[in-house]
Image (tube, helix red, strand yellow):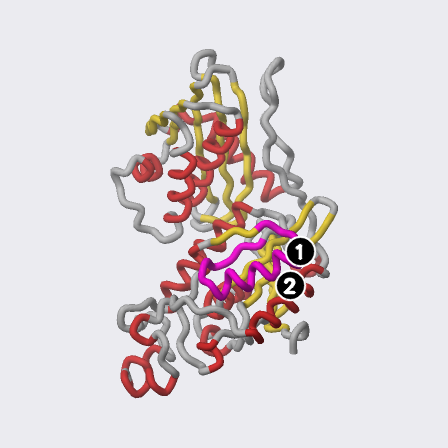
Amino acid sequence: MSSRVVVEADGGSRGNPGPAGCGAVVSDAESGEVLAERSIGLGVATNNVAEYQGAIAGLRAAAELGATELEVRMDSKLVIEQLAGRWKVKHVNLQPLAAEARQLIAGFDRVDLQWVPRAQNAHADRLANEAMDQQAGGTKQSSGAAPSGTEQAETSSARIRPSGWLGADGTPTKMLLLRHGQTPMSVDRRYSGRGDVALTPLGERQVRAAGKRLAAMDGVITADGVAPVIASPLTRTRQSAQAVVDATGGELHFHDGLLETDFGDWEGLTFGEASEQFPQLHRKWLGDPSIVPPGGESLDAVFQRVTAARDDLLARYAGQTIIVVSHVTPIKALLRLGLDVGPSMFYRLHLDLASLSIVEFYPDGNASVRLVNDISHWS
C-alpha cells in the first residue's frame, strides 16, 4: 500500500430523519486496490448527519491503515464545502460531527476534499444502502473484505433481535442517565447553568453511592469490557463522572452537547429573585420553551442541542450500554426523546440530585424509558 489513499464516503436516511446508514471505502491511490470498507447502521438520523458519519468512518479507516495523504470524495456538497471551510456549519446537529471530522483530518499530512456526482460515488452509496437494508430487514452482517493478499479491515456490525412487546428491532443503545450530585447552588435552589461550581461533601457521597450502584448493574462491567462514561465538561459533572469511573473502571469522555442550560442573567438567582427582577419574562419562560433568558438559551435550543448529542452518541456507541452524566435539563431532554412527548415534560418532570434514569434507543427508531428519578442508592 502507498501512503496515499482515496476515501469515498456516503450516507443516507429513509425519511429525514429516519432509519439511516453510512458507507465508506478506502482504496490505494496508485493501484485502485480496495483496502477497507465500512457499512454502518446509524439508527434514526437525518441525511446530513449520515453523510457526516460516512466521512468520519472513511477518515477513521484511512487512519487505521496508516495513510498519510488522502483524497476524500463525496457527493454531498454540503459536507465537502463545510469541511473545506468555505461554508459555515450552522446546524447544531452537524457542528460536533464537523468538529470530529476536522480533528481526524488534522492527523494527516495532506487531505484533498472533492465533490463528485453521485454516479461516481456508487461504491460508498451501495455500502450505505446495505447498512440501511440490514438495519431494517434483519441481522446486519459484516461487509467488505479486502481483495486476496491484502489485510481485511474490520467493519461495523450489530446484532438484531426482537424486543418483546415493544415491537422494536435491533440491539438498543442503553443510556444510564445520572444527574450530578449536590452543589452549593442546589442547596440554595439557585439557577445553576454554565456557572462552574463543585460538589458539596454530601454531593460527593451521593455520586460515590451512584458509582457503586452503576458498577453492579447488568451490562456495565462485562467480559467484553466496561461501559464508557460520557459527561458534561463542567466541574460538578466531571466530579460525578469521576466517581463513576472510580467504581467501574470505565473510560471517561466529555461532550459539550450535555451541558446544562445557559440561564444567562438568571445564573445564580433564586426562583423568587428571577421572578422579581424579570416578572413578565420569567412568567412566560415557565410555560413557553421558546423564551430565551437574557443572555441565555431557550429550552427549545437545549432540546435541539441534546438531540444532536443523542444522535452523536447513538452513532458512536450503537448497541452498547453507556453511562451519561449530565444535568437536569439535558437528562429531561433525553427522556423526552425516549417518550416522544412534547415540551411540557420540561415543566412537569422532577429529577433529584444524583438520580438515575434509563432510556434505550433502538436502531429502528423505537425507544423505551426503563427508569426515572431513582435515588435509592443514596436516599
Residue 367 can be seen in this image: no
Is 222 inside the magenta-drawn segment?
no
Name the quarter where the C terminus is drawn.
bottom right
Residue 103: x, y in percent? 40, 39
Left or right: 216, with 204 as reference point = right
Discs 2, 1 touching: Cβ within 8 Å: yes
Magenta-colored segment: predominant secondary structure: helix
Q: How many dots with numbers?
A: 2
Q: Quadrant of residue 302?
A: bottom left
Query: What residue did someone put label 2 on?
Result: 211
Q: Residue furthest top?
A: 31
Query: What residue did someone put label 1 on?
Result: 248
Could you tell me which residue is drawn at 44 percent across and 21 percent down? Answer: 5
User: Label 1 sits on what residue type?
Assistant: Thr
Disc 2, SS: helix
Is 242 inside the magenta-drawn segment?
yes
User: Label 2 sits on what residue type?
Assistant: Gly
Q: Nearer the viewer, residue 252 or 7?
A: 252
Stretch of the chain drawn in magenta: 229-251
Disc 1, SS: helix
Residue 346: x, y in percent? 46, 73
Give the vertical position of 377 relative to 233 (above or below): below
Q: Residue furthest right?
A: 223
Residue 350: x, y in percent? 53, 77
Give the vertical position of 175 relative to 378 (above or below): above
Instruction: Name the disc covering residue 86, or none.
Output: none
Q: Residues within 10 Å of mark 1 (few under 14, many from 20)?
A: many
